[in-house]
Amino acid sequence: MNQDDRARFDAALQHARLVAYPPGEFAGQESFMRASEILSLAGHAGIGPGVSVLDLCCGVAGPGRLITRELGCTYLGVDRSSVAVALAADRAGGLPCRFRVCSVPPLPDGRFDVVLLLETMLALPDKAALAHEVAAALPTGGRFAFTIEAGEPLTATERERMPDADTVWLTPLSQLQADLDAAGFQVRWQSECSEQHRDVAESMSRALCDDARNITAGIGPQAFDDLLIAHLQWVDWLRTGRVQKFAVVSEKVAS
């Protein structure tokens, strides 16, 4: 997705995203996570006043703005899209959020108490390298909090059917656990959220169809079709167990 596409998608999908979530659960996120799930994950990661948070691949930073407003942390969000970063900064208003244009990996310089990666690990093929990068940015006792789509890698047939398959790199939960262990992390909390995220994906699919004319006018018919196909595929994968969704908090332990 190029820079112009990011802005058009954001504008075209605002209404559908707003109506897809239960009341009070939309916080500007671009994902299947509900606001309450974001705050729960942040709470288990120990985010609060004075805690320094690095949010990787933050997009327009709906979750980042939510945790900064509700939990009072020190926040830096990074994303490779300058358009997304500009939108995030504009929407932050008077919140003490900082943003930077940055591709990941590598991580930006600095030491942080918590590194967040929400709904984007799927797009990173080398999760072992990522875990080592995150470990280098955290002190002993620092937390890596993330969501993960767990499952066997896509088959050739699945790749042909899935739009933007080059951003879909599933990994088994056991492999991720091994990658975390090798980087010096121990899982402190884990919660499956497959059912909840399937419900949001279903609701978002309906909202896309209900607003199809306006969305298509904004992003074009091919992009709309690809978006709907992808959402319906996630519904099927989460319903059948082809993919399981987890929220995880891991802690860097002394070597």
Image: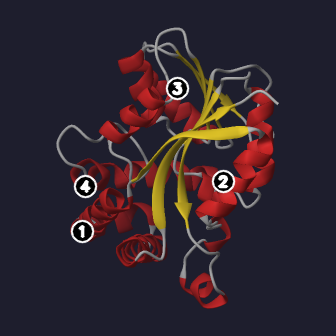
Instruction: Residue under label 1, please give it.
Output: 206
Q: Quadrant of the N terminus?
A: bottom right
The answer to whether the residue labelled 1 contacts the one labelled 4, judged by CB atoms less than 8 Å apart, is yes
Instruction: Residue under label 4, please give it.
Output: 20
In the picture shown, does residue 90 fall above or below 135?
A: above
Quadrant of residue 117 within the rendered picture: top right
In the picture shown, does residue 100 fall above or below 235?
A: above
Q: Nearer the viewer, residue 189 or 42?
A: 189
Going by the numbered disc 1, the residue's amino acid type is Arg
User: Is residue 104 in view?
Assistant: no
Question: In percent of the image, x 63 and y 21: which residue is there?
Answer: 113
Distance Cα–Cα, label 1 vs label 3: 30 Å
Which of discs 2 and 3 lies nearer the camera? The answer is 2
Q: Nearer the viewer, residue 130 or 167?
A: 130
Distance Cα–Cα, label 3 vs label 4: 24 Å
Q: Quadrant of the C terminus?
A: top right
Looking at marks 4 and 2 on the same chain, the residue that comes earlier in the sequence is marked by 4
Residue 33 numbered tag: none
Distance Cα–Cα, label 2 vs label 3: 34 Å
Name the element at disc 2: helix
Looking at marks 3 and 4 on the same chain, the residue that comes earlier in the sequence is marked by 4
Question: In percent of the image, x 77 and y 20: which residue is there?
Answer: 110
Looking at marks 2 and 3 on the same chain, the residue that comes earlier in the sequence is marked by 3
Instruction: Residue under label 3, please give it.
Output: 89
In the picture shown, does residue 238 fall above or below 122?
A: below
Instruction: Residue under label 2, please give it.
Output: 177
